[in-house]
């Protein structure tokens, strides 16, 4: 007998049986004749079992421990970096003269952080960039003012009505 689909059974072919297994799979053995489970694998090495009584406590490895990773922990320059960010934003948006102050202070915080083994705080980097942009805008404004004064002076002295 061939294996038919439910569509064949709906069409009137009575050769389909939902309990008939496909011929490619062997039938399961009767109950009680299964093979015994395989033996557990022998240990292949690796880690030794823990000592009797448990694992001994580990030494403290906080900041200042002899084998601690450098540069981890709280950066002591974060407070100054926040100040640099505030000055940089104020210098960029409101008071232009604060931008160079933020740039110079940001360079100092970056130098101090790197000398202490810490990465530069992100707030310091953002404040320094705001200070650089604000300083560039100040320089462009001063140059534009000087050019306008020069153009006005030459334009005013070149023509006279008599």
Image (cartoon, helix red, strand yellow):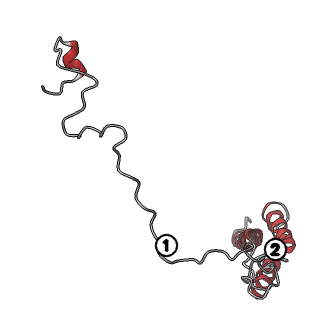
Q: Residue at x 85, y 77 (%)?
A: 76
| Closer to us: 74 or 136 | 74
Q: Position of residue 102 (x, y in %)?
A: 82, 74
* Nearer to the camera, 28 or 18: 28
Q: Nearer the viewer, residue 71 or 12?
A: 12
Q: Secondary structure at mark 2?
A: loop
* Mark 2 or mark 1: whose residue is earlier in sequence: 1
Q: Quadrant of residue 113?
A: bottom right
Near mark 1 (Cα within 10 A), the count class, few <14, some 14-19 or many ≥20, is few
What residue is rendered at 72% in x and 82% in y? Answer: 69
- The answer to which image quadrant residue 49 occupies is bottom right
Numbered circles on residues, count: 2
Q: Which residue is mark 2?
A: 74
Q: Would you identify the image quadrant in which residue 151 lies? A: bottom right
**Mark 2: few, some, or many residues within 10 Å (few <14, many ≥20)?**
few
Instruction: Determine if residue 75 is in view.
Output: yes
The residue depicted at 24 percent of the width and 27 percent of the height is 20
Residue that extends furthest to the top in the rendered view of this protein:
12
In the displayed structure, 71 sits above or below 37; it is: below
Q: Residue furthest front?
A: 32
Q: In what quadrant of the picture does the N terminus appear? A: top left
Residue 39 at x, y = what percent?
Answer: 43, 62
- Indicate left or right for 136 with 78 as reference: left
* Residue 36 position in % (x across, y down): 39, 52
The answer to which of 30 and 125 lies nearer the viewer is 30
In space, the residues marked 2 and 1 are separated at their CA atoms by: 44 Å
Residue 23 drawn at (x, y percent): 18, 35
Instruction: Please state, as top left, top right, bottom left or bottom right, where the C terminus lies in the image.
Output: bottom right
Q: Which residue is mark 1?
A: 43
């Amino acid at each position: 007998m061939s294996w038919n689909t439910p569509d064949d059974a709906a069409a009137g072919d009575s050769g389909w049986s939902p309990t008939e297994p496909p011929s490619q799979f062997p039938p399961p053995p009767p109950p009680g004749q299964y093979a015994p489970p395989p033996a557990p694998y022998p240990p292949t090495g690796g880690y030794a079992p823990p000592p009797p009584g448990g694992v001994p406590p580990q030494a403290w490895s906080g900041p200042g421990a002899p084998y601690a990773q450098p540069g981890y922990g709280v950066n002591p320059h974060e407070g100054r970096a926040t100040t640099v960010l505030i000055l940089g934003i104020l210098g960029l948006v409101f008071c232009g003269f604060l931008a160079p102050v933020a740039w110079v202070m940001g360079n100092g915080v970056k130098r101090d952080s790197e000398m202490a083994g810490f990465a530069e705080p992100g707030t310091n980097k953002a404040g320094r960039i705001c200070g650089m942009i604000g300083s560039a805008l100040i320089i462009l404004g001063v140059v534009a003012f000087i050019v306008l004064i020069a153009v006005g002076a030459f334009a005013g002295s070149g023509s006279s009505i008599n």
